[in-house]
Amino acid sequence: MSSTPSARRTRSRKLAADIGLLAVAATFAVPLAWVLLSALDPKADVGMKAPDGITLDNFDAVLTDEITFTPMLNSLLLCGGGTLLTVISAALAAYPLSRYRSRLNRPFMLTILFATSLPITAIMVPVYALFVRVDLIDTMQGTIFFFAASQLPFAIWLMKNFMDGVPKELEEAAWTDGASPFQSLIRIVLPLMGPGVAVVTVFSFVMMWGNFFVPFMLLLSPDQMPAAVSINDFFGSKGAIVYGQLAAFSLIYSTPVILLYVLVARKLGGGFALGGAVKG
Amino acid sequence: MTAPPGHRRLARSLARALPVSPAVVLMALFLAGPIGYCAYIAFTDLQLTGQAHESFVGLENFRTAFDDEDFINAVWLTLVFTFLSSIVGQNTLGLALAALMQRASKTVRTITGAVVVTAWVLPEVVAGFLLYAFFRRDGTLNAVLDFLHLPSQNWLYTLPILAVSFANVWRGTAFSMLVYSAALNEIPKEITEAAEVDGASGWRRMWHITLPMIRRSIGTNLMLNTLQTLSVFGLIWVMTRGGPGNRSQTLPLFMYEQAFQKSMIGYGTAVALLLLLVGSLFSLIYMRLLRTEV
């Protein structure tokens, strides 16, 4: 018994789609495969090859205070601090925007939306000049403040949209019991929008963790550098690049954001970061 | 005695607005402040060192820019980079991937999605470094080309702007793919099925039914991709430093070089202001596309 022509056509179309996708996936996978193989290869080179044996020597070599731990700790401090500041300020700001009517809400949200898409790269030169004037250059707190400010428009936008999804009625019981708006935000609204808060947190953290230009411009002393900038030392004046170690460090530095992404994507579905923002 | 109602209403409004203040203060000091400062020093001759006071020079910096071959070169390269990597590359490839994913088997869809998204989630500098190794003279691309008996070359030297454009496609396609997957999933099945019954071929269905139905997503996606691509710095910096010479020096890298390597902060900022204006323009268009949402 043979299948109908239309079923056969559906199957051959599926096969064509599979082949097309796999071809793209294979191309995209090449650089990723290279970094995995090189990190384990005792004699890694710039080109991809089967490793000359499997070793963890590359990881051993980079897992020192100077190369890995200090920069990673700096990254954690910068991005953790920046994210905390962003999420708290955004949650506070989103509450009145979502709960009270005001003539100012619409212009405020429009300004926020406008600011979300400004090219931050373009203002880094004036930010540098300004930070030199006010003595915030080469300070962790200055960089944290800037990170938070640059991430805030998007965070407020997302947070407000998520908060709009929490029905007002749920709070009214608490209000009649005499709870202040602040208490009802902390005890009722935020717990109910847990996934939303998680999205804003992870998104802010991932954006800051991967950002190179901001710490590159605003921090100067090597002992304050986050991993995003210190990775360039592998290329720098230290002579030949040790590709195996650079690959190992790349993996270490990338792991936290990949884990965070997987964690949130598992819970909320693939396009999580886009849900509130880019409904075209 | 109670306060007059006007006062009370004002007090209530202020109390309600209070939680917004930390965010507003942060954004005013660290975003609006620098933008304002940018608009000011773009018209001065501020330098990095050895200068007591900057002085106001009017449009001098902009006049210099438009007479500066290197600036014109950077504008061209930015246009090429944006067109190739954002409009042609990320956008088209993202749409193609999303469309293919609608039909592919679940396993293949998951694998492809995972690989493409991983490239997107990686930190910018790591992506730059991986693609640098890929395009190097003795890198993987040339190894593959040699294997296929095709001519290899030193990509980062002969075609640097193409190499960094490809790198940006590698890194940024996932975003378009996710946007378009979401958009395509929202098209009711009945519509495509009806067209299929009417005998419309795949391309015709795409052109006459699918694309018009997701046009808002296309607009949004193009805007966001373009804005993101305009401000790419780290990726190019790691791969080529803007070189060789200035053959992959887009506007952000040109701005950086003028401001810091040549210590002409005023001039660098004038370039930054132009970039900011172009970005604002795109941003306004983007807002119009979203206008029903606010």
Image: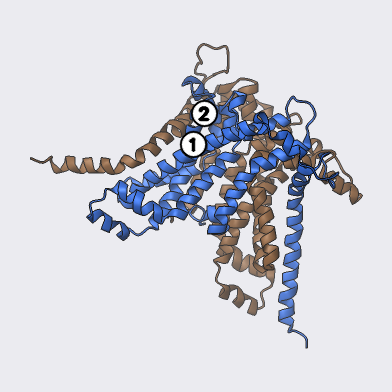
Give the chain coloured blue: A
Looking at the rendered structure, which numbered label has been put on residue B289?
none
Closer to the camera in the image, A235 or B46: A235
* Residue B66 drawn at (x, y percent): 62, 28
Q: Residue B97 appears in which quarter of the rendering?
A: bottom right
* Residue A228 drawn at (x, y percent): 63, 35
Vertical comparison of A1 with B94: above or below: below
Q: Which residue is mark 1?
A: A81
- Contact between marks 2 and 1 (CB within 8 A): the answer is yes
* Residue B91 drawn at (x, y percent): 64, 53
Residue at the far left in the pictured view: B1
How many numbered badges does the structure rendering display? Answer: 2
At horizontal 66% and vertical 34% (from top left) the residue drawn is A68
Q: Is residue B161 visible?
A: no
Closer to the camera in the image, B33 or B79: B33
Answer with mark 2 or mark 1, whichever residue precedes in sequence. 1
Mark 2 residue crowding within 10 angstroms, few (<14) / some (14–19) / many (20+): many
Q: Amino acid at mark 2?
A: Met
Q: Is residue A18 visible?
A: yes
Which chain does tag 2 point to? A
Q: Amino acid at mark 1?
A: Gly
Horizontal side of B126 relative to A143 (left or right) equals right
Q: Which residue is mark 2?
A: A140
Mark 1 residue crowding within 10 angstroms, few (<14) / some (14–19) / many (20+): some
At horizontal 23% and vertical 54% (from top left) the residue drawn is A177
Quadrant of the frame with the N terminus of chain A: bottom right
Vertical comparison of A24 with B265: above or below: below
Give the chain coloured brown: B
Residue at the far bottom in the pictured view: A1
Vertical comparison of B163 with A263: above or below: above
Vertical comparison of B32 with A129: above or below: below
At horizontal 40% and vertical 56% (from top left) the residue drawn is A192
